[in-house]
Image (cartoon, rainbow, N blue to C red):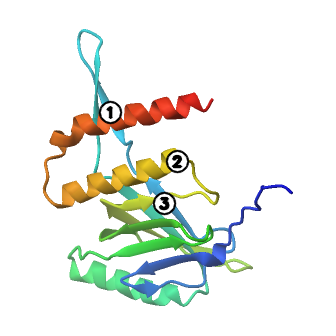
């Protein structure tokens, strides 16, 4: 008997919420795009040729949600956009995206520091078109998961990430645990290479 699994993806299990309100009427071609705006690491080169890496821990993402032109969500999103524009203030809108296709663990994206990027364009054609709403999300929390069981390495990395996030939220200086983290990553890398 084979131990292979059939991996599935069901777009209907992707849920998008803004202010806790569920969006509906997604395009059949795509629900949402999540894209990091700038690289995770920038480099500076010294005069001697050495390089220093700077890691951006507070990522900005661009999230685009694709709705059918006839989606009822367009109505309340456009009203919200008009209030946003009329008030002239940048009020924050929490957004969350969950993909539960993989079963127990699933992809998630969330941010509370969210702003409209631009008003979507409209095309009146012979068929129903797609309306794309784009949001800029500062300091987003993004978890990308696959559909299959992960290696032990991925599980250890998840625990490490949780520990770092907890330490940061408690105000613990992350520099004090940098050496321990580095040693753990070295051990993980040795474990990965020993499998090949």
Q: Give the SS element for disc 3.
A: strand
Please state the horizontal and vertical placement of residue 159, each as a whole percent of the image: 38, 54
When asked about the image quadrant of residue 166, the answer is bottom left
Residue identifier under label 1: 183
Gap between marks 1 and 2 measured at Cα: 17 Å
- Which quarter of the image is occupied by the N terminus? bottom right
Lower position in the chain sequence, tag 1 or tag 2: 2
Residue identifier under label 2: 152
In front: 131, or 157? 157
At x 36%, y 63%, the residue is 136
Residue identifier under label 3: 34
Q: Dot 2: few (<14), some (14–19), or many (≥20) neighbours within 10 Å?
A: few
Gap between marks 3 and 1 measured at Cα: 32 Å
- Which quarter of the image is occupied by the C terminus? top right
Gap between marks 3 and 2 measured at Cα: 27 Å
The answer to whether the residues at label 1 and label 2 have Cβ atoms under 8 Å apart is: no
Q: How many marks?
A: 3
The residue lying furthest to the top in this view is 48
Q: Give the SS element for disc 1.
A: helix
């Amino acid at each position: 008997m084979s131990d292979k699994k059939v991996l599935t993806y069901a777009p209907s299990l992707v849920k998008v919420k803004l202010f806790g309100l569920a969006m509906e009427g997604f395009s059949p071609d795509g629900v949402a795009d999540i894209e990091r705006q700038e690289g995770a690491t920038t480099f500076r080169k010294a005069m001697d040729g050495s390089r220093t890496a700077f890691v951006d821990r507070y990522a900005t993402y661009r999230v685009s949600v694709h709705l059918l032109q006839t989606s009822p969500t367009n109505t309340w999103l456009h009203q919200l956009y008009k209030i946003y524009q009329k008030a002239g203030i940048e009020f924050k809108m929490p957004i969350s995206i969950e993909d539960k296709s993989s079963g127990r663990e699933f992809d998630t994206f969330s941010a509370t520091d969210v702003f409209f990027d631009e008003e979507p364009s409209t095309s009146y054609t012979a068929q129903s078109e797609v309306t794309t709403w784009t949001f800029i999300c500062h300091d987003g929390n993004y978890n990308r998961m696959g559909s299959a069981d992960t290696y032990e390495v991925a599980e250890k990395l998840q625990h490490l990430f949780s520990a770092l996030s907890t330490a940061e939220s408690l105000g613990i200086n992350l520099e004090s645990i940098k050496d321990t983290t580095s040693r753990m990553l070295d051990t993980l890398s040795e474990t990965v290479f020993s499998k090949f």
